[in-house]
Image (cartoon, rainbow, N blue to C red):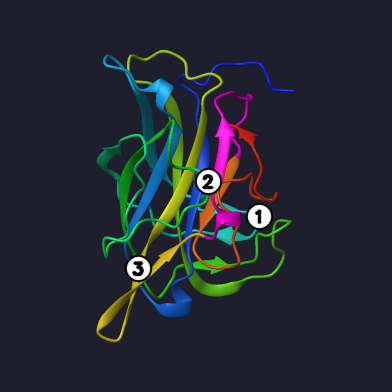
Amino acid sequence: MQPAGSSAGQSFRLWAIGNVAAKGTIEDVKLAVAYGAEYRTADRDIAVELVPTLVGGDGEYLGVTDASLPQTPVWLQAGTENTVPTLGDGSRLPSHGEYGPGIVWQEFGLGDFTEPGDSPLGDFTGSFPTSFKANAAQINVYDVSVRFSDGSSAHGVRVHFDLYNHVMAGNHAKYKFAPFSHDADGTGDIVPEPETWTAGFGMVFVACACVWYRRRKRSLV
């Protein structure tokens, strides 16, 4: 059962987590937002707003700390139907059933996730972690609003998030994307209080599911 409400003017909180302790700085991180092509017409499209904030709003949430406000994301492009976002080497984001016929997308640049990290790293798979590795992660947090570009409600619209790009390994780049169990989708309905979703690089994160749950369809809030 979907909660009542409209997504217009409401937001959910997205955590983008980089495991910078594993391989170092993750460069040119990008976030793709995919949705049904029927929502993009000649006179309107889905409008995604990403407003930088901190975990919990003040830099602390259930033992997770976050000392730095991320830079404002940069809108990069609108991907057309039957296309797939590309990694920095020109290769396509690996297929996982979220792109292709009937799907369009938008891409945002989040900047570099740098080492050393200023946030703890924990395993979010299955439940909210109770133990962390100190200063192993960069966590970028955004309050995300999804509506139509004409200001009307996006109630009922399903969106999907992917996080990706690369780390340097010697004299070459090694390209990364959040595992498919760590990406996210949801529908454009809301509940009164913001929830937190996370997106992560590496095996220790869930992405864009409510922080303490495995990936599943959730409501935008």
Please name whichever residue, 113 or 57, is drawn nearer the observer in this view of the structure: 113
Q: Amino acid at mark 2?
A: Gly
Of discs 3 and 2, which sits in the foreground? 2
Dot 3 or dot 2: first in sequence order is: 2
Does the segment drawn in magenta span residue 74? no
Q: Is residue 58 visible?
A: no
Give the label, 1 or 3, closer to the camera.
Answer: 3
Considering every residue shown, the one lying at the far bottom of the view is 170
Mark number, residue 98:
none
Question: Is 164 situated above or below 22?
Answer: above
Q: Which residue is mark 3?
A: 166
Residue at screen point 62% across, 29% down:
193
Above or below: residue 47 compared with residue 207: above
As rendered, which of 74 and 90 lies closer to the eye?
A: 90
Residue named by callout 2: 97
Q: Magenta residues?
A: 179-195
Residue occupying image coordinates x 50% and y 24%: 10
Q: Which residue is mark 1?
A: 62
State the image quarter where residue 29 is shown.
Answer: bottom left
Q: Which quadrant holds residue 148? A: top left
